[in-house]
Amino acid sequence: MKSLFLLILFSVIVVACKTPLNKATIYYNKYDDQLLDIIRQYDKLSAHHNFMCGFTDRTFKYFSIEIKTDTVRYVYNSAVRNFQLADSVIQFKIDTAGVRKMAIDMYKIKCLWVGKADFYPQKQKVTIDYLAFGMPIKKNPFNESKYLVVAYPQEKWSDSLKNYLVSRTGIQFLSDKAFFTVSNKFK
């Protein structure tokens, strides 16, 4: 009886101690090809107009696109006006069939958001493509939602830049081409 109790206790501890790195690594290894495919689709679609897009809810019912121009950022959401979303994608000459295929591929792997971001560590511009995923919902209603963000640098990073980012930002590398972080925001 005592050994059964210890076995159950050990199992609970192992499951409870799964770190975000373990979850991210498992997810990354399972969907590596699909993640890269979505990034390639996104890069091709956003080549002419910078935009970000994805689902704005965990049920994957409402799709949103943010289109940035020199002066204004346009946000269109299918939850508000579905026809405006389609019209805007056409107006900015973004491939509607391509966006639809990418959205379907995102839905298949439960990807909430895809986008591009610039940041400046060590006063050096770094551009990344990123995908955001919802972490499992906690049972505690007071816990803030967390998102797993998998990012792909557009250029190869030097070892000194990698070390700087790991020590200053807490990112963790999944491979030589991808890293992840846990965030309170998905875009």
Image: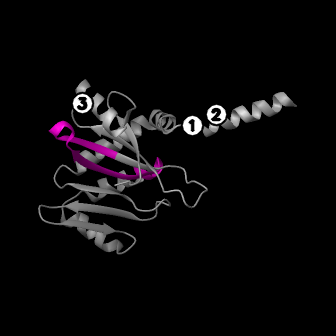
Cβ–Cβ below 8 Å for labels 1 and 2? yes
Residue on which disc 3 sits? 161
Apparent side of residue 4 relative to residue 147 in the rendered image (left or right): right
Cβ–Cβ below 8 Å for labels 2 and 3? no
In the rendered image, the residue lying farthest to the right is 1
Part of the protein shown in magenta: 105-130
Q: Is residue 13 or residue 168 the one in the foreground?
A: 168
In the rendered image, the residue lying farthest to the left is 70
Q: Secondary structure at mark 2?
A: helix
Q: Is residue 177 or residue 4 the one in the foreground?
A: 4
How packed is label 3: few (under 14 Cα within 10 Å), some, or many (20 or more)? Answer: few
Task: Give the position of the N terminus as an image quadrant.
Answer: top right
Q: Residue at x 26, y 24 (%)?
A: 159
Indicate the colouring scheme: one colour
Residue 14 disc label: 2
Mark 2–mark 3 distance (CA, rounded to whole Å): 33 Å
Cβ–Cβ below 8 Å for labels 3 and 1? no
Residue 18 disc label: 1
Q: Amino acid at mark 1?
A: Lys
Q: Is residue 80 above or below residue 110?
A: below
Apparent side of residue 35 relative to residue 72 in the rendered image (left or right): right
Q: Residue at x 30, y 53 (%)?
A: 98
Q: Residue at x 28, y 48 (%)?
A: 42
Q: Is residue 186 visible?
A: yes
If you read the primary sequence from the N terminus, does the residue marked by circle 3 or circle 1 appear first?
A: 1
Please provide percent x and percent y for residue 100: 35, 57
How packed is label 1: few (under 14 Cα within 10 Å), some, or many (20 or more)? Answer: few
